Image: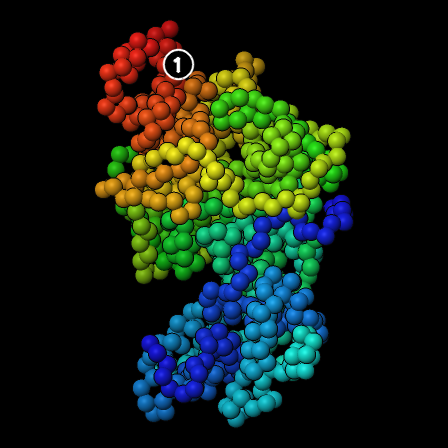
Amino acid sequence: MPKQPESPKQPGSPKQPKSSGFVHAQDKLAFLLSLVPYLLDRDRVSVVDAAAHFQVSEEQVREAVRLIAVSGVPGETSQYQHGDLFDIAWDDFEQSDEIQITHRVALDDSPRFSAREAAALIAGLQYLQAVPETLDSAVHSSLMAKLARGSSEEPSQVAVAKSEANASLVTIRSAVAGGLQIEFDYVGSRGEREHRVVDPLRIDSNNESWYLRGWCHTRQGIRTFRLDRMADLTVTSNPNLYRPGDLALSDNLFDGSGETLGVVLEVHPAAVSLLGEYLAEGAPQLERGAVVQATVRVAHIHGLKRLIASLPGIVRVIEPPEARRAVHDWAAEALAAYDDSVTS
Amino acid sequence: MTETRGPAPVPVEERLFSLVLALLATEAGLTKNEILSTVQGYRQRYVFAGDNASLERQFERDKDDIRELGVPLETIEPIDESGNNQHLRYLIPKGAYDLPADISFSPEEIALLNLAAMAWREGSLSRESRHALLKLRSLGVESIEPVLGYAPRIRTREAAFDPLTDALSRRMLVRFAYLKPGDLSPRERTVAPLALVQHEGRWHITGIDQQIGEPRTFLLSRIVGPVTRTRIPFENDARGTAETALRQLDEIWAANTAVVRARPSSDAQTRLVNRRGSIRRPDGDLTLHYTDLHLLADDLSGFGPEVFVVSPPELRAAVRRRLELTVATHQPVRPTAEEEAGRAETA
């Protein structure tokens, strides 16, 4: 793996789920059971470093350490005597924000994975076989075997089909490593083909769909491109303007908030999720008898009409009339080709 | 329920952590009474020679929470006292709790595992993957950040996913209404779930259909209504069922082919050429592989006039039916006289 160029910033990967507090007591327990062996291995570690390593807040670390320091086993007397409890170097903790466990009980090693935890990691690894960072297959198999062996039960049978390494990703990655721009032809949802010059920032995915997030020099803005809509992708010899991490990217692939066309859809309740990225979080949904009405915001109907036509009888455009007409005409034009072929 | 007795109540995580420590420390195991009367978080609420029914229920729930984290909390039944659960002893064998000492991960492996966990950051298995990440970080290995940032995401949009993974790990039969491709109404199925697999971006559940006693594969997107978890357990010693299910789906995928014609330089052409396994024929038409004719028909219908199905005839018919349905459901509402006239002219 080529060494990452010096950069004070983290690459543009999204933050892990909100680090501000664990929701369930079970999450806190998982943290306590993980923090203890980490601290024992380190001998002495600052709160800042421990928080950065676990990607939690410093206060979460302090709170956990305070709890560990007063926890232990009932012991022979069943009274939690001093020797039955963990102990820490309190002065260092309170004065220099450093952690050192000076006495431990019962616990010293990392816990095993649960069947579902191991299954989530194994299925995730299978999914990632499309990215160039994936390991060669022998190392990959041994990693999956390690996870299975590190699980307290047989991992749950959850699997994702192996996808072939994506050639576009290899090209994009080499452009980023060399600090260069890429160029490609892109076919938009209106059907127009356009040449684009882009600084790659991040690769996003959504199940089997892979996307490039990048600074588009052609459009002078951050744009999202579907990898399977790109053609003739090449690395240019022009240095890039932005590197991964230089520009903030939202976790949403599509941000409809600035779009002007509101389209009212009628959907079967069980199929609302099929609208996927189109349906903004918290968008109002009205129940109308057996169906739900939802409004999605788009720049134009041409992307949405494809989705509607792929879900016949499940999603229907209610308003505006020109959007209905666009969907109608899209399907009618396709149908005409079959009618012609019958008569000919 | 409020805890009124004693000073400040013990936080739940402190009670759970204390229970794990106590059960790890014991070699002979502790009885329920010993746990309730001595372990931090329980002992404050324990009534000597009194009724501890609610505390006992608390202990049952705590055991489930702890086991869900992969902690091997075991029960031993003394040989001489069988049948009397007051004498059951509980413990966590240290050897079964600790991650085997020879398991270690390189910084590259940790980086990849971080991405694997990140892929589940929304919805199903998101808590499991976060817990797994904490455990990985406990090993203290710093990861090597990839050159290119990634935000992978495995989406499980189907509501059936969670109850099915749960039934899978508990080995319980499930019941659901299933709308088989080509059928007009759903039929109830009772299934012993064996594996959940994602193939071509779609989730499938493989299991033994109890009516026919044979293995069947179901698409999660065709499960209509809720999945009912029964309390009926089933035996399963099969290993690698997920791999078998994926291999079978791949065989179906390889055996099914369709030929389509895409408009040059259209969105359909670019995307279908980039589709896994697609082959451009000498005449410019594309040969595609598929697992399910109806799902391919959905995808192709979305491309509208940009794609034309050459073969097989059943796929062609399926796409036509879909297009007809879209046309029928998108007729203009109360068209004005001019619109009506305009359309009549163009038709």
User: Relative to A277, is B143 on the left or the right?
Assistant: right
Is residue A133 something one can see in this rendering?
no
Say which residue appears at 35% left-offset and 60% top-offset: B233
Say which residue appears at 53% left-offset and 56% top-offset: A17
Give the image location of residue A62, x and y in percent: 59, 73
The amino acid beneath tag 1 is Ala
Considering the image in quadrants, where does the C terminus of chain B appear?
top left
Q: How is the image coloured?
A: rainbow
User: Relative to A131, is B59 on the left or the right?
Assistant: left
- Which residue does the numbered mark 1 point to in the structure image? A337
Say which residue appears at 65% left-offset and 62% top-offset: A53
User: Relative to A157, is B316 on the left or the right?
Assistant: left
Q: Is residue B93 above or below residue B116?
A: below
Q: Is residue B303 above or below residue B95?
A: above
What secondary structure is found at the residue carrying circle 1?
helix
Residue toward you, B117 or A189: A189
Give the image location of residue B328, x and y in percent: 28, 24
Outermost residue, top side: A344
Q: Residues within 10 Å of mark 1 (few under 14, many from 20)?
A: some
Say which residue appears at 53% left-offset and 30% top-offset: B275
Give the image location of residue A307, x and y in percent: 41, 31
Residue toward you, A288 or B320: A288
Is residue A332 something one can see in this rendering?
yes
Q: Image quarter for residue B181?
A: top left
Residue toward you, A97 or B243: A97
Please report, as a chain letter, where disc 1 is located. Answer: A
Give the image location of residue B146, x and y in percent: 68, 48
Instruction: State the count of labels.
Output: 1
Considering the image in quadrants, where does the N terminus of chain B appear?
bottom left
User: Relative to B75, is A125 on the left or the right?
Assistant: right
Q: Is residue B120 above or below residue A57?
A: above
